[in-house]
Image (cartoon, helix red, strand yellow):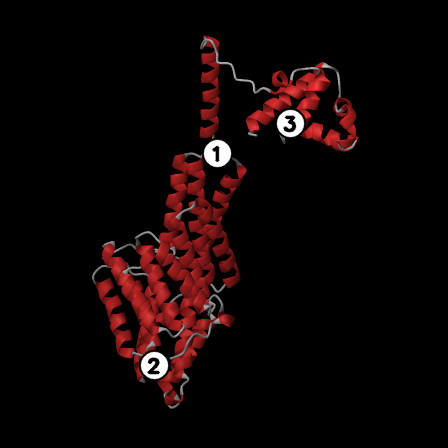
Amino acid sequence: MDADTRRQQADRIRTERKARGWDKPEMARRLARAAGDTRGSLPDHDSLLTYVKRWERGAVGVSERYRLLYSRAFNMAEENLFTRLATPEPRRFSAETTESVISETIELVAWIEQSNIGDTAIELLRENARRLAHEYPRRSPLAVMADARRLQRGVATILRSGRQRMNQTKALLELSAELLSLLALLAGDVGRYGPARAYGRTAWSCAEEADSDLARALVLAAQSKTARWENRFAEAASLAGRGVALSPSGPQKVLLAVSEATALKSLGDLEKARHALVTADKVRDEVALSRQEADAWSCPRARQATYALQVHLGARDPGAMLRAAQAADSAWAEGDPWVYGTWAQVRIGAALAYVLSGDPEGVAAELAPVFEISPDFRVATISGRMKAVERGLAHQRYRASETARGVQERIRSFCSESFEGESCRTLEVP
């Protein structure tokens, strides 16, 4: 029995009961009396009362047996009591009906268009988020983090404090996913991996609710970086690989591919790592990413070279490492955007190549300008790799080298003045 039929039955038996002045317990008693000699086969009074309540709510339809009892109790023909009533067609569409329809539609449209934010305001929020992503590789991470947190709190307040149109809510959730992903990157850069994980999980919830593959890709890029810096390499590779698979074309897809490559390198799977680097090149060619602006989610040629450099480090190939460093220098010479973090990674990578090849003077020359980076910009990704150079120079082959000892001392001083001096991470050592 369909819901409409149950509802009509419920309305009819309730109306007839009330017309006779009976309450529901009396209705149950009347049904029992109507059963006559078969009364003993009915349930007890309380159970029958429960049936009456359910029938009048339309929760269930009245069965054939009880339709007969209702007809006897009301002294009505069963077909008159339970025949489905047709909805009468209006004889004419009056002016009053027209006004009612217009009023109802206006009210619905007004409710649909109700919002606590306008489209222009959302676009301004997007512009601010883009600005912060642009400033990510250029300003002190703590300064960018403070601005990103303020902006994200504002977006969260708008989402919680009222209603928006559906497309506006989706846009705000996408924006939250991007900002929280950026905060995850920043938290990892200053060695705060617990908050980085929390930001990443929340960002994923926003991206899922917005049902945005681009937002999901940014979240996975941030989560993969956090996992990589916590030495959870298998998870880092899996997260980046998922990102490559679902990401729309764009610079973030290149970043995900090279992130997967470095995680696979850390797992010791150099063949798959090299394949991921090839994937990154293919993605760059597909979307014509010859030159691009440097921001949190882009991967210009110089930044891509730093990831290739790490894969070559895993292969213990100093020649390939130095060629990757030269590729980054050539990209900058041709006009690609220069940012301090990528530049520092290239110089440190070249220094590690000289560690492998037994050239402490080459190490010192590459790191000399890196030592001048202000403490406000000595993020964990830089200080951690500097520590890798220090440990490489601790090899017995360098025990007699005054240059090597001098570089080690400068690295220790450099790390002690970084964001997390006491937690300069011990990364893989060549």
The alpha-carbon separation of the residues under discs 1 and 2 comes to 59 Å
Query: Under tag 1, what secondary structure?
Result: loop
Question: Foreground mark, 1 or 3?
Answer: 3
Look at discs 1 and 2 and give the one toward the viewer: 1
Q: Quadrant of the N terminus?
A: top right
Residue wearing tag 3: 64
Identity of the residue furthest to the bottom in this view: 400
Q: Position of residue 358 (x, y in %)?
A: 32, 85
The quarter of the picture where the C terminus appears is bottom left
Q: Is residue 346 visible?
A: no
Amino acid type for the residue under numbered disc 1: Asn
Q: Where does residue 111 sit, x and y in percent of width and height?
A: 48, 27
**13 left or right of 225?**
right
What amino acid is labelled 2 in the image? Val
Tag 3 secondary structure: helix
What is the distance, in whole Å, between disc 1 and disc 3 at their CAs? 54 Å
Residue drawn where x is 22% and y is 66% of the image: 330
Quadrant hosting residue 229: bottom left
In the image, 410 versus 97, the foreground residue is 97
Q: Earlier in the sequence, mark 3 or mark 2?
A: 3
Residue 355 bears which disc, if any? 2
List x then y, in percent, for residue 142. 46, 58
User: Residue at 44% of width from left, 29% of height from top?
Assistant: 113
As drawn, the label of residue 116 is 1
